[in-house]
Amino acid sequence: MKKDFIVIIDDEKNIRLTLSGLLSDEGYNATAFSNTQTALDFIRTNPVALVMLDIWLKDRIDGVQALEQIKKLDESIQVIMMSGHGTIDLAVQCIKQGAFDFLEKPLSAEKIFIVIKNALKLKQLRNENLIFKSIMQDHEKILGSSAKILDIKDQILKIANTSASVLITGENGTGKELVARSIHNLSDRRDRAFVSINCAAVPNTLFESEFFGYEKGAFTGADKKKIGKIEMADGGTIFLDEIGDMDISAQSKILKVIEDGEFMRLGGIKNISVDVRFVSATNQNLQDLVQKNQFREDLFFRLNVIPITLPPLRERIEDIPFLIGHFIKKFSNDHKRKDMMINPDALDIMSAYSWPGNIRELKNYIERMVILTDRDIICGKDLLPPVAEGRDYQIVSEVKTLKEAKEDFEKYYIKRILNSTKGNVSKASEMLDMDRTSLHRKIKALNIAYNS
């Protein structure tokens, strides 16, 4: 198996033949050129890892100029300069311009292979670093720094590089597909397909053709073979969104694929083996559906190997100001508005709103505010329904003592949290970072009535 592609540029025929032979013997894919422009054209259109370049070329483009052009074509290409009468100053100049090393002629085979090995190793490390940065940037799209979000990010990092099935639960708009993509992109399957399918949008009559595909002539109108979603995801990840809406008869067919790792196209006569990781998501309680005989218990256990529960926005209130700032910056840029800001009054109102649509609702609302607000700063009076209508706390106009104002806000805020947890005092005390007994005393002292 051939190794990395290496280009040799030298106007001495013997050097070209010798280097080509040595590198080929070591398994490298080596190509030699005497003409610099021809070599540059080759580099422009082919995946080249390393160039061995003579400085003193009898050509209109010398080695130093060629080095500059190679780096412009692809900064990641490693370049080793060669010369029979170079100087230290010239070597330093080449290194400053991006050359990996400088070899003096006559060349030593041992030295050549050591330098090439080191150059290619550096290139590999840089490529891996770029890939890792790209992957982590995608992971960082899961916005927030609350304890719950940090726990989820940590869990994703731990499970990503396994093949275990994952079941993501959470309300609409909490970012279930984003988590699924992060799992895929952090795994060793990231170079293969991530196939997403909304189970609620696939009628039962079309389930098999969508998921498994069909052979030509399988039914009337099947004039050519179709590849199904499962086969598209071979080697990668399939994301089954709204899995709770999948018909019970379809569930048994998906279960067979998970258990056996194979399926058959409609009209097919042989099984097709696949290596697919299943990541599923739902906003329903699958255990309740199992009890109602609407979801197969064996499929639930197969899908729920690793459960991830995404919290609604009202349970991670501390993330709301950051999310608001992030989306304001994004949409100010997208819609070519001067960088907009939000004042404390508007921020308080938006942080207190329950956001039933979660991050999706918040994101869409901020975009609307950025487009419709005339000024460069969003104030409380600018807020639109339903956030403005949902405001049940306002800075009162009458004069109060500081103690009275504090009690008013404390009562309002605790009531908000309790309503968001549907009266679950334990959960509210955790969100408030407050002892449960102390919270009970506060509720009684301030006479707080809340929904339970």
Image (cartoon, rainbow, N blue to C red):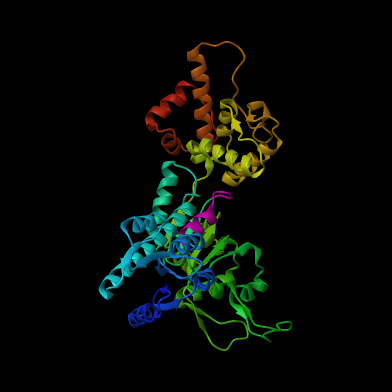
In the rendered image, which quarter is residue 197 located in?
bottom right
Residue 181's spot in the image, x, y percent?
A: 51, 59
Residue 216's spot in the image, x, y percent?
A: 66, 85
Whether residue 182 is in magenta: the answer is yes
Q: Quadrant of the N terminus?
A: bottom left
Residue 233's spot in the image, x, y percent?
A: 53, 71
> Vertically, is 422 above or below 288?
above
User: Which residue is at the front of the view, 374 or 34?
Assistant: 34
What residue do we see at 36% from left, 67% from top? 82
What residue do we see at 39% from left, 58% from top? 94
Q: Which residues are magenta?
A: 171-184
Is 244 situated left or right of 154 in this image?
Answer: right
Residue 422 seen in the figure:
no
Give the prevailing secondary structure in the magenta stretch.
Answer: helix
Residue 340 seen in the figure:
yes
> Vertically, is 263 above or below 376?
below
Is 218 situated left or right of 69 in this image?
Answer: right
In the rendered image, which quarter is residue 121 located in?
bottom left
